[in-house]
Image (spheres, rainbow, N blue to C red):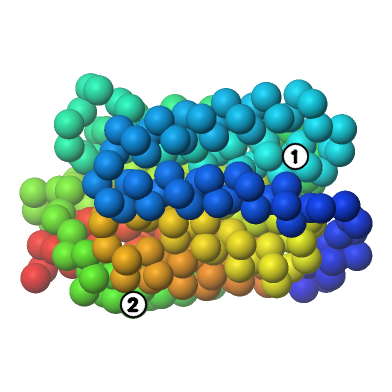
Amino acid sequence: MEISENFREKTPDIENKWLYLAIPALAIAFAEILMYLGREVESLEMHAVILLGLSFSMMFLKNEEIQKTYQALILLPILRLVNLSIPVYYETTLYSLIFIYGILAIPASIAATHQGFTRMQLGITFKKMWLYVPFSILLGLLLAEGEYLIIRTNSLIPDLSIFNLMMLSIVMIFFVGLVEEIIFRSILQNRLEMMLGNQAGLIFTSVLFGLMHSGYGNVYEVIYASFVGLLIGYLFYRTRSLPLAVMIHGSINVFLFGIIPLLL
């Protein structure tokens, strides 16, 4: 809590900051609406325009806080473009996820380095992991059950053998969960909390997290993902523990894309 209160004190007074945020946020939302409607090509084109727009804007903006905010937001069109532009795989597999999130780890780590956050702000700590690991697995199971009722996912592994479960866990925790939580929590939530204040930054990040799940073509999934993002974001806000957020996110995906579909 002390870290978050410090962020509140450092919230800069920037003229028209909501306008600076609204323009790229609405553009990202529009691109994701196109994705929701099944218009993948148009969505990719829109995200490419957003990527270029944010990139060139950072060259001309004088305010460093706005520049860093755009650097954080730029990771979202990169996430979507990489996710949909890989021609090697034509369906989601564990191997495609390794390839996609291995690439995304590069811009995510660069952005995290240049945001100017401390290790504590980024959540790089392993305190209380003895408590967070079982808590994350239990919470991940509960959240995955709710999400499965909405989107009825297929399993990414053929059976529940030890090897397959180990591979699924590695990919979902150390690739998907880690990279996405660095993007949404360590970078984006931190930056928006500093720009807008704790509550507004948390809500803004959670909505963007939900919108980035529009590819399922299910409005209830977008709403549910926003709720999950809000919950994980709140826990990150209270603990500043990136491993906690990663474990919850990874556990959800392990149950959602492996255990639950095979059991049911």
- Residue neighbourhood size for the residue with mark 1, other residues' Cα within 10 Å, grouped as few (<14), some (14–19), many (≥20): many
Q: Which of 31 and 67 is in front in this view?
A: 31
Residue drawn 38% across and 64% down? 222
Residue drawn 40% across and 49% down? 32
Residue drawn 22% across and 52% down? 165
Q: Are marks 2 and 1 in contact (CB under 8 Å)?
A: no
Q: Would residue 106 appear left or right of 262 to someone viewing this image? A: right
Q: Nearer the viewer, residue 63 or 172?
A: 63
Residue 96, by quadrant, is: top left
Position of residue 62 relative to residue 30, above or below, is: above
Of pointers 2 and 1, the one earlier in the residue sequence: 1
- For the C terminus, the image quarter is bottom left
Task: Give how far across and how far down residue 60 sits, in percent.
Answer: 79, 26
Whether residue 178 is visible = no
Whether residue 53 is visible = yes
Please give the residue where the numbered disc 1 appears in the rendered image.
68
Please give the residue where the numbered disc 2 appears in the rendered image.
142
Q: What element carries label 2?
A: helix
Position of residue 138 relative to residue 60, above or below, is: below
Q: Nearer the viewer, residue 131 or 99?
A: 99
Residue drawn 33% across and 27% down? 85
